[in-house]
Amino acid sequence: RKKAYVNKLKELVDGLHAQRSEDARKRRVEVQHLAEIQELRRKVVHTFLGYHSRFEDDRNRWNTILEGGEFWLKQPVTPYRSFRRCEIQKGSRILKGVDAMIRDSASMSVMIETIGSRNQRWLQRKSDDFLARGSSSKHAISAGHRA
C-alpha cells in the first residue's frame, strides 16, 4: 500500500510539473505575442506620423494604416491651422476617415512651411536650400543623359 501511495504521489508531482511547464510556455508565447502586437502598433504610429508630417496624399497608403473609414482623430481647435468648420464638435476637431487626414496633413504642411516665413534669415536659408536642390537635380539629370 505504501509503495502504491508513493507511486501515486510521484505521478501527481510529475503531472503538476508538466502542467506548470506548459503554463510557463503558454505565458512566454503570450508575452511574445503581446510584444509583437506592440511593435506593430509602434510601426503604424511611426508611419502615421511620417505621412502626417510630410503631406502624404496617396489615399492607398493612408487606407493601409487607417483601416478605411473606421478611423477618427480628435485634436484641439487651433487658430494657426486651416480646417473645415464641420470638423468641430464639442470644442474639438474630429477628423474622420482618409480624406480628412489628407486635408489635415496638407494643413500641417502649410503651417510648417510658414514657420519663420517673415524672418529674412529664414527666407534666405529656404532660398539657398531650394537653389541647392535645383542644382543637384540638374546635375542628376545631366548625368543621366550622359550615361
Image: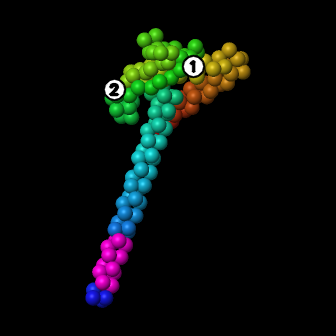
Which residue occupies 34% across, 32% down?
A: 67
Give the left or right position of residue 92, taking residue 63 as reference: right
Q: Any mark on residue 49, and which?
A: none
Secondary structure that dominates the magenta span: helix
Quadrant for residue 114, please give it: top right
The front one of 38 and 115 is 38
Q: What amino acid is at disc 2?
A: Gly
Image vertical order of residue 25 relative to residue 87, above or below = below
Q: Could you tell me residue 120's position as x and y percent? A: 71, 17
Give the left or right position of residue 10, taking residue 31 as reference: left
Quadrant for residue 98, please give it: top left
Check residue 12 for magenta coloring: yes
Check residue 120 for magenta coloring: no
Callout 1 touching callout 2 (CB < 8 Å): no
Q: Which residues are magenta?
A: 5-18
> Which badge, 1 or 2, is on the more N-terminal residue?
2
The front one of 39 and 5 is 5
Disc 2 target residue: 69
Q: What amino acid is at disc 1?
A: Met
Q: How many C-alpha atoms fall within 10 Å of the one at disc 2: few (<14), some, or many (≥20)?
A: few
Disc 1 target residue: 111
Which residue occupies 42% across, 44% down?
A: 40
Give the left or right position of residue 116, taking residue 24 as reference: right
Tag 2, which secondary structure?
A: helix
Which residue occupies 47% across, 37% down?
A: 45
Which of label 1 and label 2 is nearer to you?
2
Tag 1, which secondary structure?
A: helix
Q: Could you tell me residue 95's position as x and y percent? A: 43, 21
Q: How many C-alpha atoms fall within 10 Å of the one at disc 1: few (<14), some, or many (≥20)?
A: few
